[in-house]
């Protein structure tokens, strides 16, 4: 015990060791944050399965079956394959009505979308394939529209095809391109162009996306949601986000994508080349809390450094158990922030948690040091640390720059305060006193 009180080197080693030990509960706290985020995502998935998941709308697409011959074991056999044709023009106009659903303390964004889809197909040209025309089964052709989550369809879908109207049926005969959706089987010929139009009343959650299957694809979406994220392979040509919501418009040419207007067999590029919008919550408290928790080692190190500097300059010895209690208090900040932010906005949760921990450590410091000035220094350092961290969280793009500058300033201050200390003399004197 005397060696501990007298040996500066021993105290430095113990402080460094405690800092590393406290990394273990710090990692456990990050695991707790991930667990709560996973629980939130599970609730969101559960609600989405019943309401409608993130929606992807693809099409319409004309599919024409044809006979394909191949050599079998002892004879020529045949199977059915499909040729697919995309529209000349595809126009989509839609309004998204968002809604927040709650399950306990968790909230999930869902929406209802009203989509009006129209466009036209050119006359079907079968001569572009290396298949005899007589092998095409044009009488069995069908038109399909891909919808990723059929749960979200809220009304019957009537597709106007030229001057005829067809009630769409669920399911698609071929999964070459679309995994799920609706289809109709109009009478098609090879010498006639076709106009089409239909309305979709579609529920979904989080996002709504489209594939640019038209030779020219135009999509216009509007909503009252204030925090859109325009995602996918193409950004809107025009967009406006105001306090009343957003209004966006995409114009995509067939030259902008990596698939043709007609082809044979499967083509997954159609469903992989998407664009659209996601409806984001204003603040994801779990992501911000996780970012905060990643600064735990810096907080512990700088707080311990402050106490050690007070030890060094005032000859006041602080016991390792007291360091450990202060470290635990710093870690509790993250669990407080996590739990409070699940009920109130992140900014308020941060202020409450930071005020509680700063008050706790300051009062404890006064009881240990019995000095108002030194306790005031601790209070000021903690105010600066938590205020600085809050600024880092708000300026995500500049977090690395500001963090590096902050550490540079801290190191400069420490070097300035210790510039006149003779470390060899102090350590040798204390080691001699210990023996």
Image: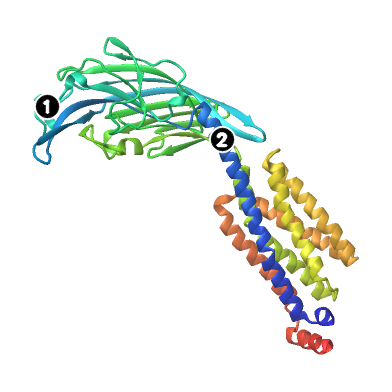
Question: Can you say whether 301 is above or below 82 in the image?
Answer: below
Mark 1 is surrounded, within 10 Å at the Cα level, by few (under 14), some (14 to 19) or many (20 or more) other residues, namely few
What residue would you read off at disc 2? 44
Give the residue at the far front of this rendering: 74
Q: Element type at marker 1?
A: helix
- x and y, in percent, of residue 337 in the image: 70, 47
Query: Are dots 2 and 1 in contact, CB under 8 Å?
Result: no
Residue sitting at x 60%, y 41%: 39
Q: Residue drawn 13% across and 31% down?
A: 128
Q: Is residue 54 left or right of residue 418?
A: left
Splitting the image into 4 quarters, where does residue 320 fall? bottom right
Task: Measuring from the top left, give residue 413's x and y in whole percent.
Answer: 71, 69
Closer to the camera: disc 2 or disc 1?
1
Q: Which residue is mark 1?
A: 135
Residue 63 pos. (x, y %):
24, 26
Q: Is disc 2 surrounded by few (<14), some (14 to 19) or many (20+) residues within 10 Å?
A: many
Say if residue 273 shows up in the picture. Answer: no
Q: Is residue 365 above or below residue 390?
A: below
Mark sitting earlier along the chain (2/1): 2
Q: Quadrant of residue 173?
A: top left
Q: For residue 427, which quarter of the picture?
A: bottom right
Q: CA distance from mark 2 to mark 1?
A: 49 Å
Residue 205 visible to an observer of this rendering: yes
From the viewer's perspective, is residue 311 above or below residue 49?
Answer: below
Give percent across and percent down for residue 203.
49, 24
């Amino acid at each position: 015990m005397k060696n501990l009180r007298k040996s500066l080197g021993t105290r430095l080693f113990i402080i460094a060791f405690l800092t590393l030990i406290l990394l273990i509960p710090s990692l456990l706290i990050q695991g707790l944050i991930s667990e709560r985020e996973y629980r939130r995502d599970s609730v969101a998935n559960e609600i989405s399965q019943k309401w409608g998941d993130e929606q992807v709308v693809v099409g319409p697409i004309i599919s024409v079956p044809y006979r394909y011959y191949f050599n079998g074991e002892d004879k020529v056999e045949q199977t059915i394959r499909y040729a697919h044709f995309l529209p000349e023009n595809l126009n989509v106009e839609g309004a998204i009505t968002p809604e927040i659903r709650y399950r306990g303390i968790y909230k999930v964004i869902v929406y209802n979308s009203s989509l009006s889809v129209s466009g036209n197909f050119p006359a079907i040209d079968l001569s572009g394939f290396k298949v005899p025309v007589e092998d095409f089964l044009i009488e069995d052709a069908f038109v399909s529209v891909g919808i990723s989550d059929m749960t979200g369809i809220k009304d019957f879908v009537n597709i106007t095809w030229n001057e005829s109207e067809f009630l769409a049926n669920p399911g698609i005969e071929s999964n070459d391109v679309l995994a799920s959706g609706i289809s109709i089987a109009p009478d098609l010929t090879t010498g006639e162009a076709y106009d089409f139009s239909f309305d979709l009343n579609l529920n979904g959650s989080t996002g709504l996306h489209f594939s640019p299957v038209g030779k020219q694809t135009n999509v216009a979406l509007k909503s009252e949601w204030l925090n859109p994220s325009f995602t996918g392979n193409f950004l809107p040509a025009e967009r406006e986000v105001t306090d009343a919501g957003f209004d966006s418009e995409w114009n995509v040419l067939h030259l902008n994508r990596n698939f043709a207007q007609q082809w044979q067999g499967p083509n997954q590029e159609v469903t992989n080349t998407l664009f659209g919008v996601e409806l984001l919550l204003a603040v994801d408290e779990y992501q911000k809390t996780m970012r905060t928790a990643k600064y735990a080692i810096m907080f512990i190190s700088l707080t311990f450094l402050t106490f050690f500097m007070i030890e060094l300059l005032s000859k006041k010895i602080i016991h390792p158990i007291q360091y450990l209690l202060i470290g635990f208090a710093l870690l509790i900040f993250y669990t407080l922030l996590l739990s409070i932010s699940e009920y109130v906005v992140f900014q308020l949760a941060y202020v409450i948690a930071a005020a509680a921990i700063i008050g706790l450590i300051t009062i404890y410091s006064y009881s240990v040091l019995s000095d108002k000035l030194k306790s005031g220094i601790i209070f000021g350092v903690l105010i600066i640390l938590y205020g600085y961290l809050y600024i880092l969280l708000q300026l995500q793009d500049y977090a690395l720059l500001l963090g590096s500058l902050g550490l540079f300033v801290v190191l400069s201050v420490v070097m300035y305060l210790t510039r006149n200390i003779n470390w060899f003399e102090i350590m040798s004197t204390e080691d001699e006193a210990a023996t």
